[in-house]
Image (spheres, rainbow, N blue to C red):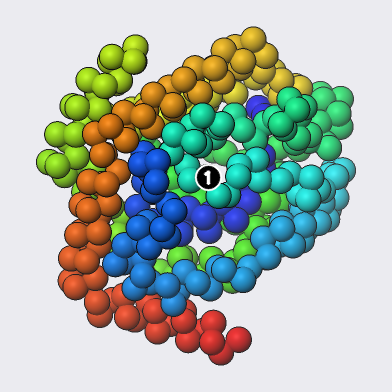
């Protein structure tokens, strides 16, 4: 299966998304004013989230890969560290995800990381040939050492809590390199508060103002030749299609059906552009921000004591260092 290895940098990013609302922006001018995308809760929690601003993730990823290599050697396998310096961000950081400009160039961004501007593969697994030469049983042991042993298949709708102690050499390396960086989001004292934040953001999508716009957006998409009921359905359909494509990859080489991949990329681009245009037409993201910011302010007012405790704990820790 072609995928970039999981790192705790991704885990940290997911944690930070709790304070972003995880929303795309369909307004072509959205994002030009950074304050337009930062709500009351995001502003309030900056003493905690700003701790991530100075982290050199590329350096930590190099350290992680070296720890993985050492761990795999102890387990009896060879492992060549991935050179993350060769994997650059495929997106222009000045173009906001979800805008028409982004969609025109990158679609939803699902396929952007697999190819460079000239169409050549950017990410190549340096261990692919080594793994391909293994027998089925050897490969299973290698994967178990690298990622951990999965006891039973995960259901599609099941909640999954990552446990580094059961995640093989990557889990060990992730904890050693990113454990401190993720501490604010792994502290059991604030787990319930984070769950409340997640539920608060989930309320945004179910707000009557947005469900009314879903219908208008759906009508616009129908006129463009697409059949989706809600805004989130469009991107999710492409995500699910890519998951299916990668799950059907050759188990030995990790290669996928290139014709199907090209067709899916074309579908991604056309869907994302129509989606962005229709969101702009109905002013979906403008309304979404209004709803989100109102809920964030209500959340800050209601949970100020817990938020202050979280800030005091981790802003103070940062200052002490």
Which element carries disc 1, helix, strand or loop? loop
Say above or below: 219 vs 214.
above
Residue found at the very far bottom of the displayed protein: 320
Query: Which quarter of the rendered picture does the N terminus lie within?
Result: top right
> Looking at the image, which residue is at 26% across and 39% down?
284
Q: Which residue is mark 1?
A: 95
Q: Residues within 10 Å of mark 1 (few under 14, many from 20)?
A: some
Residue 169 visible in the current orientation: yes
Residue 279 at x, y percent in the picture: 31, 34
Residue 153 visible in the current orientation: no
Q: Nearer the viewer, residue 215 or 224?
A: 224
Residue 157 at x, y percent in the picture: 36, 34
Residue 245 at x, y percent in the picture: 57, 19
In the image, taking residue 302 as reference, residue 307 lies left or right, namely right
Query: Which quarter of the rendered picture does the C terminus lie within?
Result: bottom right
In the image, taking residue 281 as reference, residue 20 lies left or right, namely right
Say above or below: 280 vs 195.
above
> Looking at the image, which residue is at 36% across and 39% down?
26
> Looking at the image, which residue is at 36% across and 29% down?
277
Q: Nearer the viewer, residue 85 or 287?
A: 287
Q: Quadrant of residue 173?
A: bottom right
Q: How many marks?
A: 1
Q: Nearer the viewer, residue 266 or 16?
A: 266
Q: Quadrant of residue 217?
A: top left
In the image, taking residue 317 as reference, residue 215 lies left or right, namely left
Residue 302 at x, y percent in the picture: 18, 71
Say above or below: 208 vs 194.
above
> Looking at the image, which residue is at 86% across and 28% down?
129
């Amino acid at each position: 299966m072609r995928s970039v290895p999981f790192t705790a940098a991704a885990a940290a990013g997911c944690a930070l998304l709790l304070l972003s609302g995880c929303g795309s922006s369909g307004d072509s001018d959205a994002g030009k004013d950074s304050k337009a995308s930062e709500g009351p809760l995001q502003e309030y929690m900056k003493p905690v989230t700003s701790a991530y601003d100075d982290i050199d993730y590329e350096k930590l990823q190099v350290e992680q890969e070296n720890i993985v290599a050492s761990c795999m050697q102890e387990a009896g396998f060879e492992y060549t560290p991935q050179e993350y310096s060769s994997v650059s961000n495929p997106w222009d950081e000045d173009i906001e995800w979800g805008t028409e400009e982004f969609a025109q160039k990158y679609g939803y961004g699902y396929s952007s990381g697999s190819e460079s501007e000239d169409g050549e593969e950017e990410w190549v697994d340096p261990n692919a040939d080594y793994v391909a030469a293994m027998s089925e049983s050897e490969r299973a042991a290698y994967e178990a050492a690298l990622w951990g042993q999965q006891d039973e298949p995960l259901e599609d709708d099941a909640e999954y809590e990552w446990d580094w102690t059961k995640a093989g050499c990557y889990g060990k390396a992730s904890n050693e390199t990113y454990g401190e960086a993720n501490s604010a989001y792994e502290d059991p004292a604030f787990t319930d508060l984070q769950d409340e934040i997640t539920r608060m953001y989930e309320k945004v999508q179910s707000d009557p103002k947005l469900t009314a716009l879903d219908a208008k957006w759906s009508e616009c998409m129908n006129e463009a030749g697409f059949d989706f009921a809600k805004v989130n359905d469009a991107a999710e359909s492409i995500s699910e299609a890519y998951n299916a494509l990668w799950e059907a990859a050759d188990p030995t080489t990790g290669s996928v059906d290139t014709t199907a991949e090209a067709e899916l990329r074309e579908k991604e681009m056309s869907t994302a552009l129509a989606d962005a245009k229709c969101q702009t037409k109905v002013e979906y993201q403008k309304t979404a921000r209004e709803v989100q910011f109102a809920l964030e302010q209500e959340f800050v007012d209601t949970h100020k004591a817990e938020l202050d405790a979280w800030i005091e704990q981790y802003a103070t820790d940062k200052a002490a260092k």
